[in-house]
Amino acid sequence: MLDSRPVTIRALTLPAPVRAWQVKYRSTDTDGAAIADVATIMQPVNPPAAGARKLVSYQTAQDGLTTDCAPSYVLTTGTALPAEELALMLPLVAAGYTVVTADYEGPDSEWAAAANAAHGVLDGIRAAQSFPPAGLAGPSTPTGLIGYSGGALASEWANELQPRYAPELKFAGVAAGGVPADLDYIARHIDGGPFAGIYVGAAVGLARAYPEIDTDTLLNARGKQAFTEVGDQCIAQFTVGQAFRRMRDYTTVPQLLEVPAVKRVIAENTMGRFKPGSPVYVYQGVFDELAFSPPVDKLVRTYCAQGAAVQYRRIPIGDHVTVAVQGAPGALAYLADRLAGKPAPSTC
């Protein structure tokens, strides 16, 4: 723990009925270099007795390339955080859980970088479990993870890397929805479409994490300008500003995804490389237009083949946004059962 301070959580600028702190803690980036991350810890005004406290690590869809998109900022200003995120966090606190949400992209906002995000989440959990005012029981604290879309990326990678990076941590379960399981698949399918800005934004984030992606050589003048502009924006801005753009118009190569260094980075950031450390609940829209279902179907098969306990719910109606709402009750129920000690079901 490097530092801490009490904060006020705001919902649409109004104070929320929780007690909360921001904590600064040591983590490591993609290359293992030390960085300082920030997490927000929330508890009920009247929390349960210390021995009965349970922790939920909630990964927001931070999805941005500036710390203005980070939950530590938006939770205290009451702006920018999607309504459904706070609508899930506050009921978790009201139910008696301690909730921690980390700025898992790090100080350089390395969006979409798997190891950086996983380390930020795992070290944020360590920080919360050891933060004296929270009254938790260290690594023995019953702990679960939840996240949707960009939050699912961070949650699933934390689950895959936990056995190697934070072996002392034990999770009751992880609930993830709208999972961006295969960045190559997503990029190829959204390039030139209404969500093309997400491809551009993810490319910026990964280039920050992986200097072997030589943007000076790979980008033309138009691409360098776009990357500079997007590099100081949150998803709501670059999704609009870069809609219907094609990456080939920004690069000096015909297909960025075929560049050897880019292919290596994408492979390193494709889920399923490691067996998840804890049981998983995955919920996925069959017709999701952003986090496409075929890679998620494949990921679930991979996890099952690795011997993981996976409960998979495919939702037949809805888009990426509406499935977040539809799938939330099942995800919360799954976490509640795991934190209550019930055996994890599996549809493998």
Image: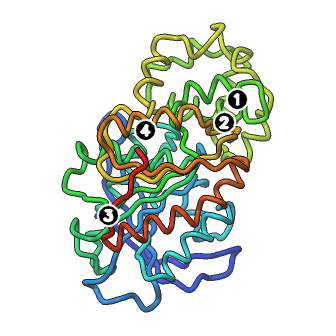
* Residue 116 on image: x %, y %: 40, 42
- The residue tagged 1 is 190
Q: Earlier in the sequence, mark 4 or mark 1?
A: 4
Q: Earlier in the sequence, mark 1 or mark 2?
A: 1
Q: CA distance from mark 4 to mark 3?
A: 29 Å
Residue 198 is tagged as: 2
Residue 343 is tagged as: 3
Of marks 3 and 2, the one in the foreground: 3
Residue occupying the far bottom of the picture = 46
- Determine whether the residue tagged by mark 1 lies in a helix, strand or loop: helix
Q: CA distance from mark 2 to mark 4?
A: 16 Å
Residue 273, relative to residue 257: is it above or below? below
Q: Earlier in the sequence, mark 4 or mark 3?
A: 4
Q: Nearer the viewer, residue 217 or 55?
A: 55
* Residue 254 on image: x %, y %: 66, 7
Residue 180, relative to residue 22: is it above or below? above
Residue type, label 3: Pro
